[in-house]
């Protein structure tokens, strides 16, 4: 039975109606009973059914039976089972993504005419850049979760570009260019950038007042690249209507925002970082802003969703909230 037929066709008999109801029930178990995509192989055997019991309030055996029945209904094997692990097949991965979309559509259909006073329910899976998550979003989360106590959040925090569809994210906060033209991006603004160094470093090399001072005083920079081994971008500065780069020496290369800031705090060199991340260090005096007229270009900030334009209430509520949280740091 085709999955799309579950919502497009009308049962022509009592037997078909019962078949549709059974498939619908098993389909609802599926997204919470499949192995975690991020789990290690040894953990996957533990992720199939035990986590369903507290979530769905049913016994492990019933979930296993429902998954086997679902495989019979759709006519393909959805899981690879061994004594040590349970993993999704390729068909299972495709089915899992489609099942989540279909069930979200049904939930949204039920909530279509609900007022804003109706509590948000369900699960929201989001991905945030590590630095933004730790310094800004997570500290503000208590207010959001207190406002929506029946909403469950799954927060991924990484500096890589996740695959929204394959990894099942509802919404992603992304810094810089989007890259994938199939995604839907909602620009929020741009993060202000700051040039900074530690007082100890500046005492050793001197405080630069111009671009010429960077070379004359033999300043060193901490190189940041998303992939170690890649060519450093260089020290970026405004040059008329565009931007240019100055190649400064530096022995340290990092690929993590936290390591980048930690290296600057340790006096290992100059950095160009978002005010959102290092603002607290500037306020405390642990870092000092330098040559403010030569900041690098600001970084675009966007909320990204997959292909669907009819966003659920919970996604729209989260996007509105996160925009309000980030506004003070944007230009």
Image (cartoon, rainbow, N blue to C red):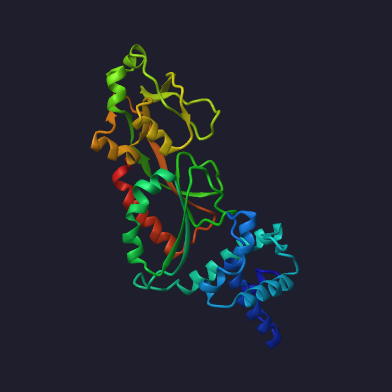
The x and y percentages for residue 31 are: 59, 66
Task: Please give left or right for residue 315 compared with residue 180 in the image.
Answer: left
Name the residue furthest top: 216
Compare residues 288 and 307 and report the one nearer the observer: 288
State whether residue 42 is above or below residue 118. Answer: above
Task: Please give left or right for residue 159 compared with residue 96 in the image.
Answer: left
Residue that appears at 61% across and 64% down:
46
The x and y percentages for residue 30 are: 61, 69
Residue that appears at 24% across and 33% down:
285
The N terminus: image quadrant: bottom right
Compare residues 221 and 252 and report the one nearer the observer: 252
Q: Report which quarter residue 275 is drawn in.
A: top left
The x and y percentages for residue 323 are: 35, 51
Residue that appears at 34% across and 11% down:
216
- Residue 15 showing in the rendered view: yes
State whether residue 51 is above or below residue 139. Answer: below
Compare residues 176 and 288 and report the one nearer the observer: 288
The C terminus: image quadrant: top left
The x and y percentages for residue 306 are: 53, 54
Compare residues 222 and 113 and report the one nearer the observer: 222
Residue that appears at 44% across and 65% down:
152
């Amino acid at each position: 039975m085709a999955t799309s037929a579950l919502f497009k066709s009308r049962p022509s008999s009592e037997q078909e109606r019962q078949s549709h109801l059974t498939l619908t029930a098993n389909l609802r178990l599926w997204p919470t009973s499949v192995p975690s995509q991020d789990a290690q192989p040894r953990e996957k055997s533990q992720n199939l059914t035990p986590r369903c019991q507290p979530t769905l309030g049913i016994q492990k055996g019933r979930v296993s039976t429902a998954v086997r029945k679902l495989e019979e209904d759709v006519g393909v094997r959805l899981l690879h089972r061994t004594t040590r692990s349970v993993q999704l097949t390729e068909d299972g991965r495709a089915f899992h993504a489609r099942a989540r979309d279909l069930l979200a559509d049904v939930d949204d259909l039920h909530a279509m005419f609900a007022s804003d006073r109706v509590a948000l329910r369900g699960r929201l899976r989001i991905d945030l850049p590590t630095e933004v998550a730790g310094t800004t979003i997570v500290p503000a989360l208590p207010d959001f979760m207190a406002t929506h106590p029946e909403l469950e959040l799954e927060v991924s925090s990484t500096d890589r570009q996740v695959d929204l569809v394959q990894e099942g994210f509802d919404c992603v906060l992304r810094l810089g260019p989007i890259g994938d033209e199939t995604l839907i991006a909602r620009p929020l603004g741009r993060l202000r950038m700051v040039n900074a160094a530690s007082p100890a470093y500046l005492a050793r090399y001197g405080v630069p007042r111009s671009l010429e001072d960077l070379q004359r005083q033999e300043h060193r920079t901490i190189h940041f690249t998303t992939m170690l081994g890649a060519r450093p971008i260089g020290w970026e500065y405004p040059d008329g209507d565009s931007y240019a780069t100055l190649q400064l020496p530096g022995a340290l290369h990092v690929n993590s925002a936290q390591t980048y800031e930690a290296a600057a705090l340790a006096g290992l060199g100059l950095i160009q970082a978002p005010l959102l991340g290092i603002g607290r260090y500037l306020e405390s005096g642990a870092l000092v802003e330098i040559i403010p007229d030569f900041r690098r270009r600001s970084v675009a900030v966007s909320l990204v969703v997959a292909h669907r334009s009819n966003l659920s209430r919970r996604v729209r509520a989260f996007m509105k909230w996160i925009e309000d949280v980030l506004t003070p740091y944007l230009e």
